Amino acid sequence: MENQKFFIKGLDGQRVLSGKIDVMGAKNAALKVFAASILFDDSIQIDNVPIIEDIARMRELLSRLGVRTEQTAERSFRLKPLFPLNTDLPDEIAKKLRSSIVLTGPILAKEGRVSFPHPGGCVIGERPIDIFLEGFEKMGAKVKTIDRRYVISADRLRPAEIVFKAPSVTATETLMMAAVLIPGETILHNAACEPEIVALADFLNESGANIKGAGSHTIAIKGVDSLKAEKPYQTPADRIEAGSFAILAAICGKDIEIAGCRPEHLKVFLRVLKNIGVEIEEAKNSIRVKKSGNLRAINIKTAEYPGVPTDLQSPLSVLLTQANGKSLIFETIFEGRLDYLNELSRMGADVTVCDPHRAIISGPSGLRGREMESPDLRAGLAFIIAALVAKGKSIIHNVYNIDRGYERIEERLRQLGADIKRI
């Protein structure tokens, strides 16, 4: 799969794609519930799971740890931990999957020990894990580094009051899961508020946990003795995928319906699109984007939820290459996430990178097809959008990066009229 590539014929700025595209289950929600399976003595079922590479890697990882994962339907999986678990996360998988770190909380809670390498994932700047380690230490765990691996152990975790120095989705989820089975009350301050955290907390509560405040900056967890899943977890729609499709529709679409999504999870982002001049109709579970008039330049600043997601920053930059005037992109979450702009510049975009966090994009620019390599999951999809709006043919290498988060993306885009093939 690492040798596969996408061959794309551009639309030369024409807005001709049309039809309906369905949004899959959220990668960042499903992965965390796969990890949460370790907290249960019995099995759990997860429905509406996207069939993507990150899910495959998580299944491999859980299997190596001693969790049985069975696919029961096209998008449904049943997971059952077989205790005692292997508490050492294997390097070759964990280094490829950033979300592997969320396993550390449940494993530590159930087994009292976990060891793991520095987690991998997309190369988008420094992603330190000290926020996790400090949280575990607050809970009474000892943290050591042995042979370039973190080893965390605790005879018994204790409740704690933890203040995050910055909101972190994965740290909030990891420590929330670790606290679910600790007697007493753990409080997380300055917690992240993303909908995926709420979905995880709701499922755990339905299974017997006592979590209050998920979706706010203060989460209180009172420990319980055990969890039992009363019903399957329904993976919510992927808001990042929905937002990416809205951008694609704004640039290349004539009339596109994005079905099976939750517009209320994208309120700020959709307001930004409307300010750019994109014509959008919102329904309860869908977004419709019609062929818009002239697109306007705008200044965009990424932020934690409910702000503009950092994961939509690169597709938004492609949109701004087609807007009239100068736009400023201010990436506040990750340093190094603007590196892909060099490739857009080679396609003909007028881009000035001011520093690792800011760039000015002047438009509209006619983009030209070219050969390029996907540097990370989100920029990979941005390159697909850029290739579709461009004139001529493009080839995108390192398709694995895109397959990590988007299921059968080329087949779904072809249904809208895109000329894209997997080679």
Image (cartoon, rainbow, N blue to C red):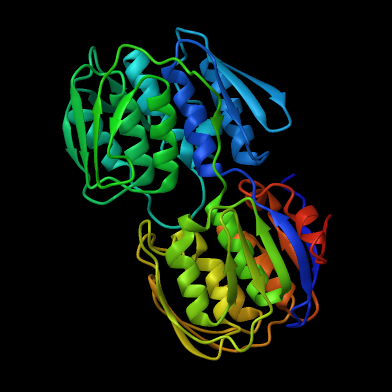
Q: Is residue 17 visible?
A: yes
Q: Residue at x 62, y 46 (%)?
A: 404
Q: To which quarter of the image does residue 57 belong?
A: top right
Q: Residue at x 66, y 59 (%)?
A: 258
The vertical placement of 94 against 140, above or below, is below
The vertical placement of 74 against 280, above or below, is above
> From this viewpoint, which residue is outermost toward the front?
284
How far across and down, in percent of the image, does residue 85 sit?
46, 12
Q: Is residue 42 left or right of residue 180?
A: right
Along the viewing direction, whichever of 240 and 94 lies nearer the viewer: 240
Q: To which quarter of the image does residue 299 belong?
A: bottom left
Q: Is residue 49 left or right of residue 371?
A: left
How far across and down, in percent of the image, does residue 147 sit?
37, 28
Along the viewing direction, whichever of 161 and 382 lies nearer the viewer: 161
Q: Residue at x 42, y 66 (%)?
A: 268
The vertical placement of 150 against 241, above or below, is above
Q: To which quarter of the image does residue 343 belong?
A: bottom right
Quadrant location of the N terminus in the rendered image: top right
Q: Is residue 352 left or right of residue 113?
A: right
> From this viewpoint, which residue is outermost toward the left?
161
How far across and down, in percent of the image, does residue 419 sit?
83, 66
Along the viewing direction, whichever of 152 and 263 lies nearer the viewer: 263
Q: Is residue 151 visible?
A: no
> From this viewpoint, which residue is outermost toward the bottom?
325
How far across and down, in percent of the image, does residue 413 sit?
76, 60
Number of numbered discs overlaid on the protein picture: 0
Quadrant location of the C terminus in the rendered image: bottom right
